[in-house]
Image (cartoon, rainbow, N blue to C red):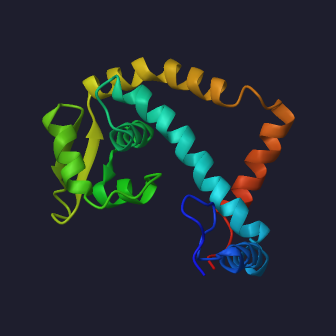
Amino acid sequence: MLPPPGSAYFPLDNHRYNNYILIVSSSSKSSRPAISLENRIFVWLLRAADTLSQEAEQLVKAAGLTGAQYNVLRILRGAEPEGLACRAIGDRMISHDPDMTRLLDRMEKRGLITRARQTDDRRVVKARITAPGLSLLRTLDQPVHDLHKRQFRHMSPARLKILSDLLEEVRVRKPA
């Protein structure tokens, strides 16, 4: 028997389908494995690091540098006056740069660093920061310091010390 024209009757009863969807969605949530505390901490560390580094990246970008270039300049300032082999710079980088040579090429072209092949071992190329590189780095010292102060102003010195100790403990652990 057909319903009268214009009635609200639907020939397809999807009531069971709707219940199935509700049952599957609620059971899939409960059957999903619980996220471990370690996994949550790992994700939150990555997200926090990304947020903080994006803010720093914006600051150094205003000076015409990338975060990696700024990191190289800081590393080379700390290695003065001897300078460092390119491989040693790569080892000290916060984030691994797959093409250190090209990064250093761009910095040398801008006059921020110099590179010289060692006479005692021609395989080694040492990089040094130049006066313009040091000058640029000096102009960023206070703004970067101020940024870090702002980034952590919501935490007391005691909590910052605890955070620092915990992060150091994570950093120096034995590899998994």
Q: How many numbered circles are shown?
A: 0
Q: Residue furthest right?
A: 158
Report x, y in % for residue 102.
19, 52
Image location (x, y in percent) of residue 92:
45, 54
Front residue of 131 and 53: 53
Q: Quadrant of residue 74?
A: top left
Residue 33 vertical placement versus 68 (above, below)? below
Q: Does 17 sit left or right of 71 as displayed?
A: right
Q: Residue at x 33, y 40 (%)?
A: 69
* The C terminus sits in image quarter: bottom right
Nearest to the observer: residue 153 or residue 75: 153
105 w.r.t. 4: above or below: above
**Image location of residue 14, percent across then percent down:** 64, 75
Q: Quadrant of the N terminus?
A: bottom right
Residue 65 image position (x, y, % from top left): 31, 32
Q: Say above or below: 52 vs 94.
A: above
Q: Which residue is painted at 13% across and 37% down in the image? A: 109
Q: Is residue 105 left or right of residue 153?
A: left
Q: Residue 119 or 56: which is nearer the viewer?
A: 56
